[in-house]
Image (cartoon, grey):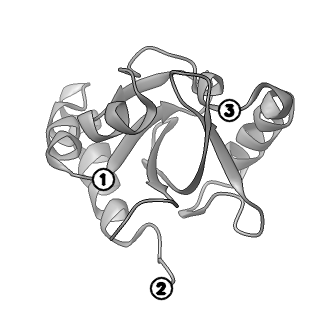
Amino acid sequence: MRRVYGWAVLELAQVAASAHGRSGNLDETIGILGASHRAMIIVDGETGMIVHANDAAGELFGAPLGGVGVNRLVPERYREAHDALRSGFMRDERARPMAAKVDVLAVTRDHGERHVRIGLTPIPSTSLVIAEVDPLDARV
């Protein structure tokens, strides 16, 4: 089944942008992400730091992720290229799957690697990006 990224998450990003402009924080969005059974991570696209990750993301990667650099989730051999790709995404922000034509690997706490599918949705008027992470080996 083909996934379309960004539809519901784009609405969430609109809520986040509104909340960010209103109160200077993303508590409302973080609350919504926290309720999701899917792994959801908010990354500052400029610094590469994880601003928030819900419990499902912590379970997927085997550790809490808030305050960690997103490159910790990228296999070491791909980190330099990932930095360049992240910068490119920030220059052309739009909701889309990450690396649609290649396998994406993510590093877990035990230094193992998992195949994942990642959808990226920028939060308008911020440097923040919501990453929706699906393990490809999960049973539906």
- Label 2: how many residues lie within 10 Å, few (<14), some (14-19) or many (20+)? few
Label 2 secondary element? loop
Q: Are marks 3 and 1 in contact (CB under 8 Å)?
A: no
Tell whether 23 sits left or right of 85.
Answer: left
Report x, y in % for residue 8.
Answer: 30, 68
Residue closest to the eye, 138 or 106: 138
What is the crowding at mark 1: few (fewer than 14 residues within 10 Å), some, or many (at least 20)?
some
Q: Under tag 3, what secondary structure? A: loop
Residue at the far top in the pictured view: 67
Q: CA distance from mark 2 to mark 1?
A: 17 Å
Labelled disc at residue 38: 1
Classify residue 12 as left or right of residue 40: left
Q: Earlier in the sequence, mark 2 or mark 1?
A: 2
Q: Quadrant of the C terminus?
A: bottom left
The residue type indicated by label 3 comes to Val
Instruction: Measure the alpha-carbon separation of dots 2 and 3.
Output: 26 Å
The mark found on residue 1 in the picture is: 2
Residue drawn at x 75%, y 38% is: 87
Q: Residues within 10 Å of mark 3 (few under 14, many from 20)?
A: some
Q: Nearer the viewer, residue 66 or 124?
A: 66
- Mark 3 sits on what residue? 74
Secondary structure under tag 1 reads: loop
Residue at 37% across, 72% down: 7
Say which mark, if any, is on residue 61: none
Tell me which label, 3 or 1, sits earlier in the chain: 1
Image position of 4 (left or right of 25) = right
Q: CA distance from mark 3 to mark 1?
A: 19 Å
Whether tag 2 and tag 1 are in contact, CB under 8 A, the answer is no
Image quarter of residue 70: top right
Q: Which amino acid lies under the numbered mark 1 shown in the image of this protein?
A: Arg
**Res 12 → quadrant:** bottom left
Q: Position of residue 74 (x, y in %)?
A: 68, 32
